[in-house]
Image (cartoon, rainbow, N blue to C red):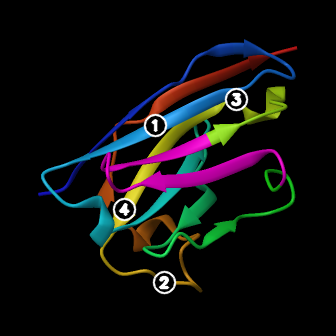
Amino acid sequence: QVQLVESGGDSVQTGGSLRLSCVVFKYAASRLCMAWFRQSPGQGREAVATIDHRGTMTYSDDSVRGRFTISRDDAKNAAYLQMTDLKPKDTNTYYCAADEVCATSTWYLDEYWDFWGQGTQVTVSS
């Protein structure tokens, strides 16, 4: 069973940066597509970015494109989300997701992903 453990969440001020990490246990990350989602209380999970086996990155929309960068390091069995120029609207719980199959057209749907981490909290104050 694939296990994902996120870390790196913190409280920062507007304009700050954070790097979230997602370490994969009990499976080779090189065999997984990875993604980051975020969720506010009472809301559904919102797709942020995904990266496939070859390192091809896709971002959900212009609100994160240019500020967030998804990456992976298969040697460390991990994926990352570098976040810069953080804004209060980025305040969320961020989740790492993984799946053995990469779906280019449905990756933004949370029900597509088989494996999830426990989440890490990011709080951005103005």
Residue 81 higher or lower than 106, as above or below:
above
Query: At 65% across and 13% down in the image, what residue appears?
Result: 11
Q: Who comes first in sequence, dot 1 or dot 2?
A: 1
> Is label 4 in a helix, a strand or a loop?
strand
> Which percent across, then down, holds residue 84?
78, 34
The residues tagged by marks 4 and 3 sit, at their Cα atoms, a distance apart of 22 Å
The residues tagged by marks 2 and 3 sit, at their Cα atoms, a distance apart of 27 Å
The numbered disc on residue 103 is: 2
Residue 45 is at least partly visible in this image: no
> Is label 2 in a helix, a strand or a loop?
loop
Which residue lies under the disc numbered 4?
98
Quadrant housing the C terminus: top right
The numbered disc on residue 91 is: 3
Numbered circles on residues, count: 4
The numbered disc on residue 58 is: none
Q: Who comes first in sequence, dot 2 or dot 3?
A: 3
Tell me which segment is drawn in magenta. 66-81
- Which of label 1 and label 2 is nearer to you? 1
- Which of label 4 and label 3 is nearer to you? 4
Quadrant housing the N terminus: bottom left
Q: Who comes first in sequence, dot 1 or dot 3?
A: 1
The stretch drawn in magenta includes residue 70? yes
Q: Who comes first in sequence, dot 4 or dot 1?
A: 1
Q: Residues within 10 Å of mark 2 (few under 14, many from 20)?
A: some
